[in-house]
Image: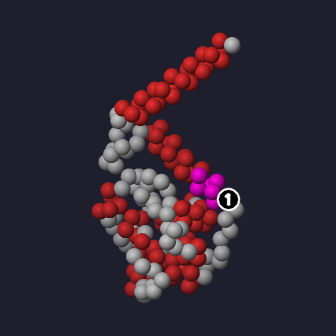
């Protein structure tokens, strides 16, 4: 019985200490100061596992359709490039001021499934600056963004510029 009592007391003390630390304001939440390694690991692992878990069972449509890729490019060029960049685009003042830094999607999409990309675009990620586009975009438009992202890793600055030169107004897309 004394072991259980000791464990309960230890748990209460740990919880009280955590609450005291939270209320102390000592942890620096400034975007100019990186998280400590344990906090960064915990948050990064939480995001990765959540994306994997919530994307389970999501089935992607045909992502090779050039028309779908084109629609996805238009949305990416309007909404995403300011934070995530693009081939031939330098980092913006906005993207440089965000913490955590938005990932370079030409690199990071290689590690994500289409379902994980879809889920992330649709739902966003809390406290990262990644908005949820699901409330304002249909699943078809979100899949179009995924289709474009799948082409991004092999895209050159010239190819991106050529797509941008062909960009037309989207009557169903208001930013």
* Rendering coords of residue 10 (x, y %): 55, 20
Q: Is residue 86 visible?
A: no
Nearest the eye: 75 or 9: 9
User: 111 above or below 154?
Assistant: above
Q: Residue furthest top?
A: 2
* Rendering coords of residue 172 (x, y %): 48, 83
Nearest the eye: 35 or 141: 141
Q: Quadrant of residue 76?
A: bottom left
Quadrant placement of the C terminus:
bottom left
- Point 31% across, 48% down: residue: 32
Nearest the eye: 34 or 175: 175
Q: Magenta residues, as a range?
A: 50-55
Q: What main secondary structure does the magenta stretch of the protein show? A: helix
- Point 50% across, 45% down: residue: 43
Secondary structure category for the residue under label 1: loop
Residue highlighted by disc 1:
56
- Does 52 sit left or right of 78 as displayed? right
Magenta region includes residue 9: no
């Amino acid at each position: 019985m004394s072991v259980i009592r000791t464990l309960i007391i230890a748990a209460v003390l740990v919880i009280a200490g955590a609450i005291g630390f939270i209320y102390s304001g000592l942890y620096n939440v400034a975007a100019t100061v990186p998280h400590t390694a344990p906090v960064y690991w915990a948050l990064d692992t939480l995001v990765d596992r959540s994306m994997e878990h919530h994307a389970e069972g999501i089935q992607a449509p045909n992502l090779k359709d050039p028309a779908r890729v084109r629609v996805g490019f238009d949305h990416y060029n309007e909404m995403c490039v300011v934070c995530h960049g693009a081939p031939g685009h330098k980092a913006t003042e906005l993207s440089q001021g965000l913490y955590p830094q938005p990932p370079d999607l030409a690199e990071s999409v290689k590690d994500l499934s289409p379902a994980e990309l879809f889920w992330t675009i649709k739902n966003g990620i809390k406290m990262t600056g990644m908005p949820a586009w699901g409330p304002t975009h249909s699943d078809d438009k979100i899949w179009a963004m995924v289709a474009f992202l799948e082409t991004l890793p092999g895209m050159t600055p010239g190819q991106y510029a050529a797509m941008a030169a062909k960009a037309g107004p989207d009557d169903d897309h208001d930013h």
